[in-house]
Image: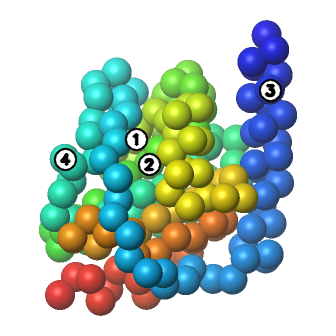
Amino acid sequence: MKQTALIIIIAFIALGFGMTARHVFPPAEKISPSALPEFNLPDLSGHQHTISEWQGKVLVINFWATWCPPCRKEIPDFIALQQQYADKGVQFIGIALEDKEPVSEYIATTKVNYPILLGGDNGIALAHQLGNTVDAVPYTLIVNRQGQIINRHPGEFSKEQILDVITPLLN
């Protein structure tokens, strides 16, 4: 019970950060490339996936939660971009920062065409390790074909902003 209360409190704090992040933080910024570390997380069916499954692709890794309005707002654009750019080697990956049940319910009503992995507490720690020092939700990384993180974006990430970053990587 205490763990559930703690998760709820953290969720509300993260929600506040996520909702204000795009106003507080500058737009997506280019950073010095850094290697994406190896990690693995389960999908909704419990099958473990390692990030190296998508080696050689441009990755858009999005840390999100069903209770996060900016996260839910991004997903339709992510679905459209995944469909439009899959044949050009772009792969979106969603990492849900919560338990399986709410994610399964959300995915049942929103037909997501990219992998959704369950991060839970491990996902929060992973996002922090990958540069999310303010625990913003959503939090998105863009990784080039060489496996280097080239962009970190706390808060809502628009379709236009994503295209500005990934388009040069498609050649």
Residue 148 or 171: which is nearer the viewer?
A: 148
Q: CA distance from mark 2 to mark 3?
A: 23 Å
Q: CA distance from mark 3 to mark 1?
A: 24 Å
- Secondary element at image label 3: helix
Q: Amino acid at mark 2?
A: Gly
Q: Circle 2 is placed at which residue position?
A: 94
The vertical placement of 83 against 127, above or below, is: below
**Label whose residue precedes the other's in the sequence (2 or 4):** 4
**Percent x, y for residue 103?**
53, 32
Q: CA distance from mark 1 to mark 2?
A: 5 Å
Which of the numbered marks, if any, corresponds to residue 6?
3
- Quadrant for the N terminus in the image: top right
**Label whose residue precedes the other's in the sequence (4 or 3):** 3
The answer to whether residue 13 is seen in the rendering is: yes
Q: Residue furthest top?
A: 1
**Label whose residue precedes the other's in the sequence (1 or 2):** 2
**Label whose residue precedes the other's in the sequence (4 or 1):** 4
- The image quadrant that residue 33 belongs to is bottom left
**Label whose residue precedes the other's in the sequence (2 or 3):** 3
Residue at image position (21%, 65%) is 57
Q: Circle 4 is placed at which residue position?
A: 53
Q: Circle 1 is placed at which residue position?
A: 116
